[in-house]
Amino acid sequence: MLLEVEDLAGGYGAARVLHGVTLAAARGAVTALLGANGAGKTTLMRTLAGLLPAAGGAIRFAGAEVTALPAAARVERGIALVPEGRLVFPALSVAENLRLGAIAPRARAGWRTRADEMYALFPRLRERARQPAGALSGGEQQMLAIARGLMSRPDLVLLDEPTLGLAPAMVRVVFDTIERMRALGLAVLLAEQDVRRALQAADAAYVIEHGRVIAAGRGADLAADARVRRAYFGVD
Amino acid sequence: MSERRDAVLVLGALGAGAAVPAIGSDYWTGFAITALMWIALAQSWSVFSGLSGYVSFGHVVFYGLGAYLVVATWDRLSPALSVPLAALAAAAFALAIGAPVLRVRGPYFVILSFGIAELVKFVVIAAEAAAGHASRLILRTPDLAALFYLMLALAAAATALAWAVRSTRLGHGLRAIREDEVAAETIGVPVARYKLAALALSAAVPGAVGGTMAMRATYFEPLQAFDPMVSFTMIAMAVIGGSDDLRGPVLGALVLVYLSELLWAGAPQLYMVILGALVLGFALFVPGGLCGRAGARRARPA
């Protein structure tokens, strides 16, 4: 497994949100994190990326312990977070956003080629390359956030609620992109509220509640799991 | 590449200014020292605050410490040693306070930076009082032309430094921090290290400038060396000229130095009023300053 998380605890200072999360994510696979608002998905993503400190447990990436590494060092190892809310650099142009995505030392060589690949992946971004990112639509900003994340040449992409607030056509584009990342051999960890779609796309999934994993399994199995059906599909 | 053009332009203009002591009177040489001092200070301020968006209201502390170091070591060290030492001491002080101070953002950082400068001012006042000095005089200072060339070199150093920072990964990372610090962290900017490095780099030249101005004044008085107006003025210059542009702080410094020269004689009280109004107007309506990137981008067709 590329990413192995063991008994991870964390949160915001004294406010503990994660109470021992154990999960794994493999190369060339989509791993979904399911759970209601406030279950701890974003906290988990941010702790994995190094934006929040772990209060206990371990994060292993590509066989090495990264639990105590700062965020920049994790990017350098190959972990990229596409944060909830996109967080593009609004005053900078689309092209500048992509350029900054390659600021990590591992990403510097060949950044122009990679930017071209991103424009091929998202033609809308090429059309808007010189416009400030803040002027893009929500869907375009999400494409930019994903492209900026991919500019760092990651092995693991942490996608935090990438379809939140997007129009259905844009949601399709995002899931197509996720499929593409899997085909390229990346490990994708996807926090998603659209449970139906996430389970369709996922090879494996974890259900999180109150900062704990309450169910785990293959995507198709979980879709049939009674607890998941009750909690998310409203059926018995 | 326009950054390189700007750097060549500014450094070339400073080089042309080297003729001032040869062709101008002492009045003009003195005036040029003041202008160069502000260019060096505003340019240094913009290296940290202009790029990172952490608005320092306390940069005078580096200036004051530099002045204090040169004056306190006057009988023991030659200025050739104490002025570079002043730059190093200012940078070292920035490193020491940076780690805790740079953890707070926005208005809290503004207030904290101001508070630290005031704190240091009163510590120096107390130390001087305990040592039996109300103010200190220094004798046998370098002549006006020597001070001019020293200040010219400092203005050029600040410009070269600003250029170097802007054209490297450090500058790009600082801009990312300014735009969105969390996003900067997710793309792999070593946020804490970059902020600290920028603060130290932006403190060094002001330290040397403070030491040089102490020689120009031939005395040291803490209330003056740590006057918060020095911080406010460099901010005003950078904001009016444009703090994310190599030419901006230079232009802002020239505009305000000229304005103050016009007004101090006739209507000194008006200077402060106009300065306040200008800063307010620029911050609200021309956030990129006279050389603003934002303004240029808006004007460019999409």
Image: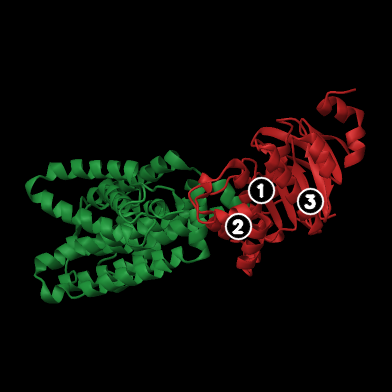
Chain colours: A red, B green
- SS class of the residue under badge 2? helix
Q: Which residue is mark 2?
A: A101
Q: Which residue is mark 1?
A: A82
> Image point 75% across, 46% down: which residue?
A175
Q: Quadrant of the N terminus of chain B?
A: bottom left
Q: Position of residue A103 (x, y in %)?
A: 58, 61
Q: Quadrant of residue A42?
A: top right
The span from disc 3 to disc 2 (Cα, nearest Å) is 21 Å
Q: Amino acid at mark 2?
A: Gly
Q: Amino acid at mark 3?
A: Glu
Q: Is residue A176 left or right of residue B58?
A: right
Q: CA distance from mark 1 to mark 2?
A: 11 Å
Residue A54 appears in the rendering: no
Vertical order, B96 against A46 (above or below): below
Residue in front for this viewpoint, A193 or B122: A193
Q: How many marks?
A: 3
- Choose mark 3 or mark 1, whichever is in front: 3
Co-location on one chain, circles 1 and 2: yes
Q: Secondary structure at mark 1?
A: strand
Query: Mark 3 or mark 1: which comes first in sequence?
Result: 1
* Mark 2: few/some/many CA within 10 Å (<14, 14-19, 20+): many
Percent position (x, y) of residue A17? 71, 34
Q: Position of residue A76 (x, y in %)?
A: 67, 60
The chain that hosts pointer 1 is A
Seen at 61% across and 52% down, the residue is: A124
Q: Identify the residue position indicated by label 3 in the image.
A: A179
Counting residues from the N terminus, which is met first, the one under dot 1 or under dot 2? 1
Q: Are marks 3 and 2 on the same chain?
A: yes
Dot 3 falls on a residue whose secondary structure is helix
